Amino acid sequence: MISALIEGVLAGETRSIARAISCVEERRTGAYELLDALYPHTGEAHVIGVTGAPGTGKSTLINQLARAYRRRGTRVGIIAVDPSSAFSGGALLGDRIRMRDATVDSGVFVRSMATRGAQGGLAGATIDAICILDAAGYAKVFVETIGVGQDEIDVARATHTTLVVEAPGLGDDIQAIKAGLTEIGDIYVVNKADRDGADQAVRALQMMLEGGILGSEPAETTGNTWRVPVCETNALEGTGIAGLVREIEAHRAHLQQHGGLEEKERLRAKTGLEALLREELMSRFVARLGPEEWENVISRVATRHMGPHEAIAHLLAR
Amino acid sequence: MISALIEGVLAGETRSIARAISCVEERRTGAYELLDALYPHTGEAHVIGVTGAPGTGKSTLINQLARAYRRRGTRVGIIAVDPSSAFSGGALLGDRIRMRDATVDSGVFVRSMATRGAQGGLAGATIDAICILDAAGYAKVFVETIGVGQDEIDVARATHTTLVVEAPGLGDDIQAIKAGLTEIGDIYVVNKADRDGADQAVRALQMMLEGGILGSEPAETTGNTWRVPVCETNALEGTGIAGLVREIEAHRAHLQQHGGLEEKERLRAKTGLEALLREELMSRFVARLGPEEWENVISRVATRHMGPHEAIAHLLAR
């Protein structure tokens, strides 16, 4: 059954891909076998993180980018990690309808990840889903995130190009810029460019980039730095999309020329291995200890009969 | 030296508290001893999480709540985990000045946590800081977070009362409501109540609460549910603060009456122990393996010579 699933994914069949992601997300039997079998077929996709606060229009922007790449015949995968995404199951008010463009096209695969309760953590499940879409031959994989927290940092490490999306008029502009991991952006996008304050937001970002307050992480091995651009778009109207696509492609070319891709692959492998190892060590340890003993220790700490580090020392000594 | 620090914290000395938090955050020698010595003196503080998107005015709201509690003679601790917080070091413009009220009063202790690179993770460092402020006799401890990601879930488990702060006019109201962990709120606050759309946001939240779309987690042991209120405030003007304080106190009384505090203590102990154990198991494993071997495995996975799960199985078999 797993071998049929592997074949289906490698043939790019939508149903197999969806089932493979569910299988991996829920850590069903055969999930590891599946991932390891697909793994040698990965490394071809260009993975693009799209991050920004709710209300910046990330989903609409991704929809437009997907359309632009589809016009070139490129197959596009979309993974929504942001619970407020219009792509995600968290959409309350029919926002999904807006996403029709992307989702009725068989060359586009859309998937939203559960934000809680994913076995092995959200970051791990997302990285596995990227791997499946990569193996299935999607040349561009967009990953939509909010950009805050450890999960997001881990997901960002699995992407090649990070777009940070801002929108004018979300409280203070500066407030929006400060939010989260703006310093990891490879490309900044000021969306909703028709709004008051858009030009001001672009100028503020440019000043911060020039002043070194923002900027992508320097390439460790080569020291060759990417000039971080600021793009203006109006995703609802579709303006500015062609320019943004050019910058995305320029960033990929830059990575290829300066060894950045190998570096990213290494970081991705390391992050993935660490997450797997942490999970595996923990579950083995609790299994060996026995659930009663584990509950007992928790109770003693909760009632202040034992300090937490004393408890850990006691557990590890056994 | 650690024993002097312990004494200083228990005596409520500001400098000792600041040094203790740094010691723990950077995992300096004696950090565990310090935490375990303080631990029996904890359990008295009422820990209040304040979560919401950037731009909702969380910092200003906490500042007003701190003033209200100070008028009652209560000592207040404030921990900012949100990198965009006006309390945090991430503040770029002179936002900190606005926070003067809270920070010049010796009965108020303010600390912002580094959002990256904290040894042992942000959630662990924050939970440890809560423990230190609790032992130092701060009766109310506010923890300001953005409300997205695993770190935030872990921090939320260490708080007794969670305020979810919304503000009208941050993109779609619904978009703001959907963002993140809104379903864990014990009290909802619509701040910036002078803005257009505030009453609408209040009504939308009330409807979602009545419809069961939002709501706090039901008390597992008693099944006695808390009626989640929606408060309107204008933190800049200071309106609505007295009503919000009443709801915060009502929630604490509810927890005390229905056994919710014991339940929260248990969850807090469990989360803390799990985080410590995961970290400890991982660092022991890599130390035993040797850094060269670990780097070697990462390289083999990055270059697709080995699947990640195969690599983990190989490592654990040794």
Image (cartoon, coloured by chain):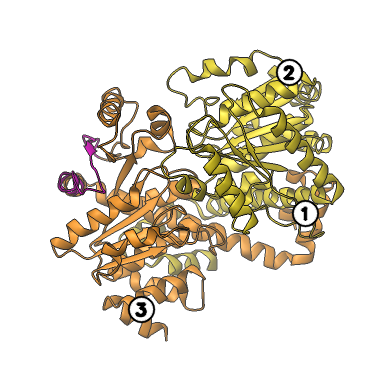
Chain colours: A yellow, B orange
Mark 1 Cα-neighbour bin, 10 Å: few <14, some 14–19, many ≥20: many
Which residue is the extreme one toward the top? A104
Q: Chain of mark 2?
A: A
Image mark 3: chain: B
Placement of B285 over or under B180, stated as above or below: below
Q: Which residue is mark 3?
A: B16
Q: Residue at x 48, y 58 (%)?
A: B92
Label 1 SS: helix
For marks 3 and 1 on the same chain, the one whose residue lies earlier in the sequence: 3
The residue beneath circle 2 is A107
Work out whether disc 2 and disc 1 sit on a shared chain: no
Answer left or right for A210 relative to A46.
left
Same chain for labels 3 and 1? Say yes or no: yes
Q: Amino acid at mark 2?
A: Gly
> Which portion, as a residue range, is magenta?
B222-248
Which part of the image, by quadrant, shows the C terminus of chain B? bottom right
Quarter of the view holding residue A66: top right
Residue at 73% over, 52% down:
A267
> The disc numbered 1 marks a residue on which chain?
B
Residue located 81% across and 21% down the image? A11
In the image: residue B314, left or right of residue B56: right
**How far apart are labels 2 and 3 at the CA level?**
60 Å
Label 3 secondary element: helix
The N terminus of chain B, quarter of image? bottom left
Residue carrying label 1: B298
Amino acid type of disc 3?
Ser
Q: Is A210 one of the magenta-colored residues?
A: no
Marks 2 and 1, how far apart in space? 33 Å
Cα distance, mark 3 to mark 1? 42 Å
| Depth order, front residue of B53/B86 | B86
- Frontmost of labels 3 and 1 is 3
